[in-house]
Image (cartoon, rainbow, N blue to C red):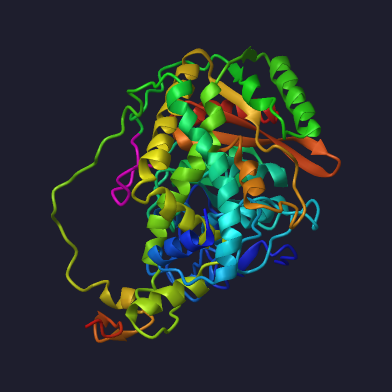
Amino acid sequence: MKDDLNAFLEIFEDAKSYGEGPLSGKTIAIKDNMLFEGHKATAGSKILEGFVAPYDATVVKKLKEAGAIIVGRTNMDEFAMGSSTESSAYGVTKNPHDPERTPGGSSGGSAAAVAAGLVWGSLGSDTGGSIRQPAALCGIVGLKPTYGRVSRHGLIALGSSLDQIGPFAKTVSDAELIYNVIKGQDPMDSTTISEDTYSARKKFGKTIGVPRDFVEKEGISEEVKKNFEEAIAKFESLGYGIMDISLPSLAYALSAYYIILPAEASSNLARFDGVKYGIHKDGENSIDDYFKTRGEGFGEEVRRRIILGTYVLSSGYYDEYYGEAQKAKEAITAELRQAFRSVDLVLTPTTPSPAFKFGEKSSPLEMYLEDIFTVPANIAGCPAISLPSGFSGKLPLGIELTADLGREDNLFKAGKDFLNEN
Amino acid sequence: MDAQKVLDLAKLARIEMGAEEAKRLSHEFDAILDYVSEVKKVSSNLPLQRGRMEGVYNVMRQDGEPHASGIYTEKMLLQAPAREGNYLKVKKIL
């Protein structure tokens, strides 16, 4: 396999089949934040350089049992913090459609590997859009399942109330096949759900809600808006009913996300101290060891978010930021669930623009705005899928469908209709 | 947020940081905090709809059926930067 894109951080020389099952003979890549016993996992960070996984993540165990051949670990933004794979400590990944542009992120390597045909499918993790956004920018299918649908055991944690593992593939049917293998309740992850946690009684009525107040805001490129209207027209031609809906709370989703996420990340990343695993930098005394290890081991974006998280959780600011963000989370979830009483799916673009050039997003905030359409599904826990919806020049575009909690089935039905897979 | 505050926070987070980075971050934080502060309008602008997250509850179980003592020790310690016997090794604290 020739990897000109730096999609892979490592191609496993010992790749082989561990069993027989629905994925027999299929090549799969895993994001560098999932543990595969006896193999390196660094989460794209220097602080975990040389770390070898002592056990299998549940998703890896399931892939093995299903007969998949896990061929390598893919590049990612450091600790999945980013939307371009530029924050990886091991170099950027190039977009297969234009090597001067990013593949998106944070699961950029997993998306690029599938889009370039290096593997049949791959796994990514999605905390605020890290599967769907790179899927859109690379022109493939990417699914974030319902929170709790897929076990996070053995996934290096970013934001534990938001993180979810999901598949990348070229078709909805392939993504569904991987999803069916990796999903399921797991005693090793107490947040996993069962098949009957959420009701699946409501029949699929082919109705799609379009939150125009949310979609038609400034900062969304004209080509994305045009492509989005074409996607709506296509769904109409397929017999779907399109309804305008109003979801005013979604305007607060990104703000809430960039409070909740750094808060959880700052706590989750406290474990990297140079004592238990990963690199160790020597200081004058024990606490100085922590300062040096974390100071040298964490890259810029990780430091930024840890400090932001420390701030919003600190005494005197906690209620003002974290408390308010939790209220926003409640409002967003309630509003989305209310919408799903009258529509089966909510449709938005996946990203505000097609793939951008390396270094193009000059400030952190500009990069954060890349997640505007994907973050609400993580905040509410809902499943969402990005589908390839055409091109702007040579650059792919994507649309995103979001479904009610537990209703991945509706995403697959509409996704297959949209991509003419039936 | 001024640079000194960033340095104080970095200290809390156990991250060594130089003055220049703290200064740069302080400007970025002003922009980020300005943006995320939008969230404070939620309480006043939106009717707060309670009763979300059906199906979300604490999952508890009895302690029991532990694995045999020590069977993972070697595997875990293999990843430690420094060890002494079956212990993680750190510098003297007292």
Task: Determine whether, in the image, residue B84 is placed left or right of residue A294.
Answer: left
Seen at 75% across and 42% down, the residue is A354
Give whichever of A318, A277 is nearer the camera: A318
The span picked out in magenta is A184-194
Viewport quadrant of the C terminus of chain A:
top right
Task: Determine whether, in the image, residue A289 is placed left or right of residue A376.
Answer: left
Give whichever of B13, A345 is nearer the camera: B13
Give whichever of A51, A16 is nearer the camera: A51
Task: Determine whether, in the image, residue A20 is placed left or right of residue A91.
Answer: left
- Above or below, A355 against B19 in this view is above
Give whichever of A358, A129 is nearer the camera: A358
State whether residue A106 appears in this view.
Answer: no
Seen at 49% across and 60% down, the residue is B6
Viewport quadrant of the N terminus of chain A:
bottom right
Seen at 43% across and 41% down, the residue is A321
Q: Position of residue A123 (x, y in %)?
A: 54, 51
Q: Position of residue A298 (x, y in %)?
A: 51, 68
Q: Position of residue A234 (x, y in %)?
A: 74, 21
User: Magenta stretch containing residue A189, yes or no?
Assistant: yes
Q: Position of residue A27 (x, y in %)?
A: 59, 57
User: Magenta stretch containing residue A367, yes or no?
Assistant: no
How many numbered badges does the structure rendering display? 0
